[in-house]
Image (cartoon, coloured by chain):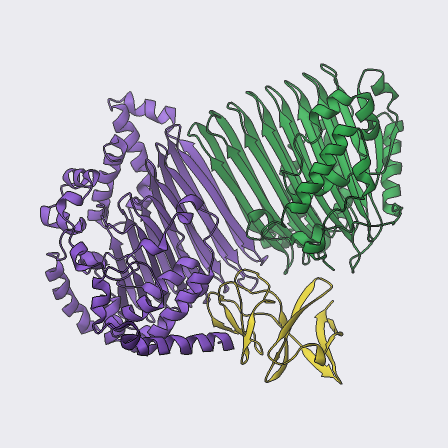
Chain colours: A purple, B green, C yellow
Amino acid sequence: MSASMKRQKQDLTALGEDYATKYGFHDPVDYFHKGAKGINHEVVEMISRMKKEPKWMTDKRHEALDIFFSKPTPQWGNTKLLNDINYDDIYYFMKPIEEQQTSWDDVPEYIKKTFDKLGIPQAEREFLGGVTAQYESQVVYHSMRDDLKKKGIVFLDSDSALVEHPDIVEKYFSTVVPSADNKFAALNTAAWSGGSFLYVPPGVDVQVPLQAYFRINAENVGQFERTLIIADKGSRVHYIEGCTAPIYSTESLHCAVVEVIGLEGSYIRYTTIQNWARNILNLVTKRASAHKNATIEWVDGNLGSRLSMKYPCIQLIGEGARGEILSVAFAGRDQHQDAGAKMIHAAPNTSSRITSKSISKANGRASYRGLAKVYKNAENSKVSVVCDALLIGEEARSDTYPTMEIDSEKVSVEHEARVSKVAEEQLFYLTSRGLSEDEARLLIVNGFMEPFTKELPLEYAVELNRLIELEMEGSIG
Amino acid sequence: MHTQDSEYTIPDTKPELERGPLWLRNRRRLSRDDFNRTPLPHRALHLWRYTNPTSFLSPLTDTADISDSEDYGDAEKTSLKHLKEGDLAGLVTDLGGREIKGYGLDQLTVRGVVVSPLSRAVEEHHDLVEQYLYGLVNSQTGKFEGLNGALWNDGIFIYIPDNITVENPINLHRLAGRAGSARFHRLLVVVGANAEVTVVDEYGGGSPDTGDNPSYTNSAVEIFGLENSRTRYVALQRQTRGANSYLTHRARIERGASMLTIPLSFGGALSKQNFGVILNGKGAESNMFGLLFGNGRQHFDNHTLHHHTSGQTKSNINMKVVLRDKALSAYTGLIRIEKDSQVCEAYQENRNLLLSHGAMARTIPELEILNDDVSCSHGATVGPIDPQILFYLQSRGVEKEDAVRMIVSGFVASTLTLVPEDLRQRIDDFVARRLEDI
Amino acid sequence: MGKYTGIASTSDIPEGKLKVYEIDYHRILIAHTSNGFHAVADECTHDRVSLGEGCIHDDEIVCPAHGARFNLRTGAVVAPPAVVPLDTIELKIEGDEIFVLLEE
């Protein structure tokens, strides 16, 4: 690193050691009891100490914080909401004890109504509403862990993984998304807490989908989750996170980073359904690296939040690698789903497919931002991109900004996009067969989403269909 | 070499700023002020991602003469021949935006059609010119449009009165200057209600090769198509291999009017062209059919815009790109449909054929749709010649180069068939000449 | 085919520094490390940004935009988000002149 950075680093280390004398605190937890908001090097040092992290991680956090301060806010996407973020008004680690307990009364009405309609059991409601820290299926999780452990699979929250398996974490952490990648990746690297860590040893086929849902507790419904997934050579795994039921959190900025690595010949499917409450800004950097003959699939559903900016990316860096991204976005009243997909072909004989489906209703805005980049050494590669947007209602808005940068002549690239509303003829056909207009519209929307829902495990698909039904009825939001 | 942008401002003393009546001088000064205070466009914008804006900071002082390249002389001879044979309604030569000469225009003048230098039109048709000039392309459009707005010397004005149909094309020849020169072109076309015209706008000449001294051209084209008018505009870019060229075209068509735009990008070292049509009245329809052929180290950066500000409008874009050697084409096409523009149809297709290793294509078809009652789609493809077809032709005794040419012709054929019959021959001729080099 | 073209003198670039030159459409970066002079294409393979404002550390160059790192001798990627190596250019020194091999 440069001389000035070296000097800065020395200052920071000194800071940590001097802490007690400098600030007169004896117990670091005390610091947080005083209700500290905002982020700076002291906060970062404390986060790292409380988690008992190895020095390399502490250094990385400090370095990332400097990068965060030096980068400007992106001036694309929903610039109004992005420029309005007040970074000093956020708790970056722990809220003061007095403020930790959310009462059931605090949970917004529309969320409670959704729980009702979806038939969510009470205990689960409290968990999703952030009212309780414990979740019954913790028990399920623990027994699953024992089975996995026998095969050598490591499936933990990221904090524990760093402490229990520091070597694997150090080997892969930040190798796909570096701190300097963008402002929010830098913030996450400085302040991260929670998230999943999954390592599958060579040749192991994890037959049951692993669900993060079982592993989280309300505290870890984290603002700055850091997830790292590694499938070693020839292994296979399906990982699912999120759920269709809405999740409520009082902290309105969620800034996650997900890194996925598929080593030679492996297969990873990563399914996410995001349905954050409507007060949340959800800014995620998720990227995967597929090595030789590996296959990586993202199945990405964006239903909630006030603004979601998320562009899952697959880098095909080994010959014969394959990537697929299937993305669905539903933008209802006052929502902006700014989603997309990026495929980077950096090796020969690679293939990819992007399917993006979006629905905008009321004054919702769904945007697709994509990139298909084929480097000149990526001969014999194939890329296919299909974007379909359905608009419901006069105020709905859809934007499509796909970019294709092709530097090799021995490849085939295709892109297609369509924007339409629910077709009169289709509606007429269905209503003339006895369906009400609402029912007809719902059926059409379900049909539109079908390529996505059929890729979900059954219980998710069922819940998703129920949720869409509620959105279409207009009974939510 | 690229000029440093912080030093680059238009001084108060440029003689162009004094040309014209008071209202025009004021507009020039406004353009100059806007240009001087606007920073260079940010490279992160899609519009400027692939081309360095400093490439268009043309020298502000030059004494280079008008080019007299042989190639251009040929083109002029061909046009004069067409004129004599009655295939053209008129011919205008625009020498570096300084000397505008008309040929064979009597037949038009007799019917009330105006084809004249802007310097004369600002006196003789001041109401029309003042009403429309700078209406679509001005310093608010962009920094380099501001440069043009201040420094254009003389340009061309075409006015077709209501209900007049001009059957044959009016041909314009715009000639770039020599190495190191900077020329500004301006065209204003106003097509009256229910009137009809075809304008073929050819850009030629320029510095012969690359090296440190390209020639610079900056052209602004504004076309107003009033109610029920029918306008066809062909823009043929065939400047030399040392030419830097910047073109912004904007057309606005009203109720019931139609517009056909045919961009043909064949020449220049670095060419950035921005074509836009605003569909501003019910029943308006716009089509754009474009072809691009690049080889050597040519760099093309093209944009199209179809902006539906009124409902019940229809637009369609079909662009074909063929690249060889290390040529690069970047194409950004935006379709924007406003909130109150219901019942619109908009389509866009861009296909890129890459003939060699090192050719590069960027394509970004964009959509901004603000209401739900639309039917809108776009598609883009990038790929090489189908090796099976090539093999088939070669196995039938066709030489490889000829086979490639045949396949390329086939590739562009589906776009060429969209060109109306009477224009087709002309376009085919332009394409055939270009294909000889590809 | 290519030919060697003179591009700079060794005294133009102190150790630890780099400079960007443009010849005939090629943008070339010359870096002076403790191991001597290296020539690479001046374009980060990640997002095509110029490396001119980047910095040198040992044998590596860091891109100022997103932190990608490349080995100056081999062009190999050392740190993400780049995934494709940097193009290296043959360089030779004659006397105190630096020459680079440019293709036609």
Nearest the eye: A110 or A72: A72
Nearest the eye: C92 or A224: A224
Q: Is residue A72 above or below residue A469?
A: below
Question: Relative to residue A346, is residue A64 drawn left or right?
Answer: left
Q: Quadrant of the N terminus of chain B?
A: bottom right
Q: Residue at x 49, y 55 (%)?
A: A382
Q: Is residue A288 above or below residue C94?
A: above
**Residue A450 falls in image quadrant:** top left
Q: Residue at x 29, y 25 (%)?
A: A430
User: Whole-percent x and y of residue B201?
Assistant: 76, 35
Question: Relative to residue B339, is residue B45 drawn left or right?
Answer: right
Task: Count the marks.
Answer: 0
Q: Is residue B255 above or below residue A441?
A: above
Nearest the eye: A351 or A276: A276
Question: Relative to residue B20, is residue A173 drawn left or right?
Answer: left
Q: Residue at x 26, y 45 (%)?
A: A277
User: Whole-percent x and y of residue B184?
Assistant: 78, 41
**Residue C7 falls in image quadrant:** bottom right
Q: Is residue A229 visible?
A: yes
User: Whole-percent x and y of residue A321?
Assistant: 43, 63
Q: Is residue B399 visible?
A: no
Nearest the eye: C7 or A31: A31
Q: Is residue B160 above or below residue A91?
A: above
Q: Residue at x 64, y 57 (%)?
A: B359
User: Whole-percent x and y of residue A330?
Assistant: 33, 40
